C-alpha cells in the first residue's frame, strides 16, 4: 500500500460509513474493477482485501485506475479546487465580486456554486464575505484613528452597511471593541461542577467566556475596559444550562454565544458546534469541513482559541490516529467529558 498521510484503518472506516468529510482526503481504488471512488460513493462496498488507498486522484491514476462513473470523484476534485479558488479571490479582493461574477470566475452556474461553497465551508459565499470584512474591521480598528476610517478600510461602502451586516457577528460596537470593551457589561459567576469550578460570563448577546479554573480577574484581563459585574439572577438560568451541559451533555445545544475570531476560526467553531454529543471528529475532518483540508494545524489552533469551553465542544475533536490530543483544561477533563457522551478512549 502507498505511504499515505492518513490512517488506513480510519480511512477504510470512513469509506464503509460513506463519510463525506473524507472526500478529498483519500481515494479508494478497487483492484477487481480497476476504478477509484471517493469515500462517500453510494456503490456497494468491496471486500477490504480488494481495496487500495491513495492520497489523491493523480496517484490513483498513475497506478492504472480510472474514475468511478457513479460518484464521479474527478468532478468532486474540481469542485474543491473551485471553492479554494473562490476563497482565494474573496481573501485577495478589495471589493468582493457578487455571487454571479464569483461563480463565473470559477466556471460554475451561480446556484450550483452557492450549494458547493456552503457544503464545503459551512457558510454561504455572502456569509464568508461578511466574515472577511468583519475580520478586516477588527484589524483596521487596531490601527485607524477613526471608526469611520476603519469601516471604509475594511471594505464597506458606507458606515450603514457595516452596522447592517456586522450586527449579527459582533457583540460589541466598533467603538467599544476599539476601547477594550468600554460601554459593554459582562456578567459573571463561578459555578460548581463535578469537574471543578467553572467561570461563566456573558454579555447581553450571549456567552463570551466559559472556562475551568478562572475567575473574574481573567475577564478583566480579556476585557480591560468593560463593566464586569456579578451575574446574579440575570445570569442564573444561562449558567444553569451551561452546567447541565457539563454534567449531562446534549441537553442544551443552542446556547447563545458572543465571541469573535477570524473567518477561519469562526468557521471551525461552527463546525465544532455541529458535532452531535457522542460523536468525534479529527482535526483533519474539521479542516475539510470548513473547506481548508490542508489547514489541519490551523484547525487545531482555532480549537485552542475557543473562548467558550463545553458550549463550543472542542473536547469532541481528536487526532487523526484516534488518540485524544490536548485540551486547554487538561486531558483528564476531556476524557471524562467524552466518556459522559459515550466515547471511550
Image: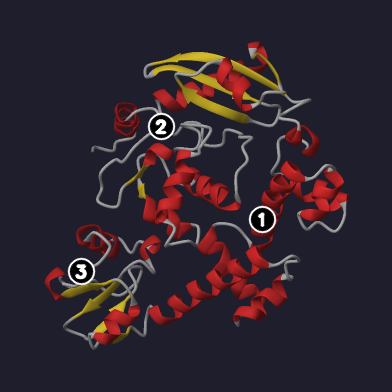
Who's the residue at 80% across and 48% down the image? Answer: 150
Q: Residue 301 occupies which quadrant of the picture?
A: top left
Q: Secondary structure at mark 2?
A: loop
Q: Residue 181 occupies which quadrant of the picture?
A: top right
- Residue 74 against residue 182 in the figure, above or below: below
**Residue linked to disc 3:** 3
Who's the residue at 38% across and 41% down the image? Answer: 316
Residue density around tag 1, few if under 14, some if 14–19, many if 20 or more, within 10 Å? many
The alpha-carbon separation of the residues under discs 3 and 1 comes to: 37 Å
Residue density around tag 2, few if under 14, some if 14–19, many if 20 or more, within 10 Å? some
Q: Is residue 314 left or right of residue 227?
A: left
Q: Secondary structure at mark 3?
A: loop
- Residue 154 against residue 331 in the figure, above or below: below
Who's the residue at 34% across and 28% down the image? Answer: 330
Residue closer to the observer: 132 or 112: 132
The mark nearer the N terminus, 2 or 3, is 3
Determine which of the numbered discs, if any, sits on residue 328 in the image. Answer: 2
In which quadrant will I find the N terminus? bottom left
* Marker count (numbered): 3
The mark nearer the N terminus, 3 or 1, is 3
One can see residue 94 in this view:
yes
Tell me whether circle 3 and circle 1 mark residues in contact (CB < 8 Å): no
Determine which of the numbered discs, if any, sits on residue 132 in the image. Answer: 1
Q: Secondary structure at mark 1?
A: helix
Residue closer to the observer: 111 or 183: 183
Where is residue 177? Give x, y as percent. 73, 35
Where is residue 261? Give x, y as percent. 60, 44
Residue density around tag 3, few if under 14, some if 14–19, many if 20 or more, within 10 Å? few
The alpha-carbon separation of the residues under discs 2 and 1 comes to: 27 Å
Where is residue 194? Give x, y as percent. 37, 16
Amino acid at each position: 500500500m502507498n505511504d499515505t498521510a492518513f490512517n488506513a484503518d480510519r480511512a477504510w472506516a470512513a469509506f464503509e460509513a460513506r463519510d463525506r468529510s473524507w472526500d478529498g482526503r483519500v481515494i479508494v481504488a478497487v483492484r477487481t474493477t480497476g476504478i477509484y471512488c471517493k469515500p462517500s460513493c453510494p456503490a456497494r462496498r468491496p471486500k477490504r482485501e480488494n481495496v487500495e488507498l491513495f492520497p489523491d486522484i493523480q496517484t490513483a491514476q498513475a497506478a492504472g485506475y480510472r474514475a468511478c462513473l457513479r460518484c464521479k470523484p474527478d468532478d468532486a476534485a474540481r469542485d474543491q479546487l473551485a471553492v479554494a479558488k473562490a476563497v482565494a479571490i474573496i481573501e485577495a479582493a478589495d471589493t468582493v465580486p457578487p455571487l454571479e461574477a464569483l461563480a463565473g470566475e470559477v466556471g460554475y452556474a451561480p446556484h450550483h456554486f452557492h450549494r458547493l461553497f456552503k457544503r464545503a465551508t459551512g457558510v454561504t459565499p455572502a456569509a464568508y464575505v461578511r466574515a472577511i470584512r468583519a475580520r478586516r474591521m477588527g484589524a483596521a480598528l487596531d490601527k485607524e484613528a477613526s471608526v469611520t476610517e476603519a469601516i471604509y478600510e475594511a471594505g464597506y461602502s458606507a458606515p450603514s452597511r457595516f452596522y447592517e451586516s456586522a450586527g449579527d457577528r459582533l457583540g460589541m460596537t466598533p467603538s467599544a471593541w476599539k476601547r477594550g470593551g468600554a460601554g459593554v457589561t459582562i456578567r459573571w459567576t463561578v459555578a460548581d461542577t463535578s469537574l471543578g469550578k467553572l467561570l461563566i460570563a456573558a454579555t447581553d448577546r450571549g456567552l463570551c467566556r466559559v472556562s475551568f479554573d478562572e475567575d473574574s480577574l481573567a475577564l478583566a484581563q480579556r476585557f480591560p475596559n468593560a463593566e464586569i459585574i456579578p451575574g446574579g439572577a440575570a445570569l442564573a438560568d444561562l449558567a444553569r444550562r451551561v452546567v447541565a451541559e457539563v454534567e449531562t451533555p446534549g441537553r442544551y445545544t443552542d446556547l447563545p454565544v458572543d465571541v469573535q475570531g477570524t473567518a477561519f476560526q469562526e468557521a471551525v467553531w461552527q463546525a465544532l458546534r455541529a458535532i452531535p454529543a457522542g460523536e468525534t471528529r479529527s482535526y483533519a475532518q474539521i479542516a475539510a469541513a470548513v473547506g481548508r483540508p490542508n489547514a489541519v494545524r490551523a484547525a487545531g489552533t482555532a480549537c485552542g482559541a475557543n473562548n467558550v469551553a463545553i458550549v463550543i465542544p472542542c473536547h469532541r475533536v481528536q487526532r487523526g490516529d484516534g488518540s485524544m490530543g490536548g485540551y486547554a483544561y487538561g486531558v483528564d477533563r476531556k476524557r471524562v467529558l467524552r466518556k459522559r457522551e459515550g466515547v471511550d478512549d
